[in-house]
Image: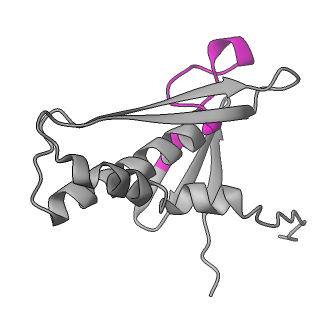
Amino acid sequence: MAETIEVSFPGGQRVDAAIREFNITTDQSKEAGGDQSAPQPYDLFLSSIATCAGIFALKFCQSRKLSTDGLKLWMDWEPNKSDPSASRMVLRLQLPEGFPEKYQNGILKAMDLCAVKRTIEQFPQFESRIEQA
């Protein structure tokens, strides 16, 4: 069964999305005519990849009762030369001191289970259509 995100346009360059019980606000940079009051949609997209990988790393540690003190994750991305989309993304995980070596490959594999990353890799179909009021 399909799920729906309802998008609204509250003014200026803001575009909001209601998903489940959450309201997500986006805006554009001042250079793009916005107020820069919220992340841009592309910022949320990139952040969703990093935070999705992060929750899998966190759950991996928690399920094995491994310390998460000092666990950090960064995502570096390189924009394409022809447009602002990303040509490469690198997730860098800093493990806590004393993290068992036997789990290092496992935590990386867990991060690869991220549904956001998997969706991108599977090239979902996009369709746009007009709905009459």
Q: Is residue 86 visible?
A: yes
Q: Horizontal placement of 47 versus 87: left or right?
A: left
Nearest the viewer among 8 and 122 is 122
Residue 104 vs 80, above or below: the answer is below
At horizontal 52% and vertical 46% (from top left) the residue drawn is 49
Nearest the viewer among 38 and 1 is 1
Nearest the viewer among 105 and 23 is 105
Q: Horizontal placement of 133 versus 77: left or right?
A: right
Residue 111 lies in the magenta-colored region: no
Q: Is residue 26 visible?
A: no
Judged from this view, the residue extending furthest toward the bottom is 1
Q: Range of the magenta residues? A: 24-42
Nearest the viewer among 71 and 23 is 71
Task: Quarter of the image for the N terminus: give it.
Answer: bottom right
The x, y position of residue 57, in whole percent, is 32, 52
Task: Quarter of the image for the C terminus: give it.
Answer: bottom right
The x, y position of residue 30, in whole percent, is 64, 13
Residue 47 vs 116, above or below: the answer is above
The x, y position of residue 31, in whole percent, is 70, 11
Q: Horizontal placement of 28 versus 87: left or right?
A: left
Quadrant of the rendered structure where residue 88 is?
Answer: top right
Quadrant of the rendered structure where residue 81 is?
Answer: top right
Residue 10 vs 120, above or below: the answer is above
Residue 26 lies in the magenta-colored region: yes
The x, y position of residue 29, in whole percent, is 63, 19
Judged from this view, the residue extending furthest toward the front is 102
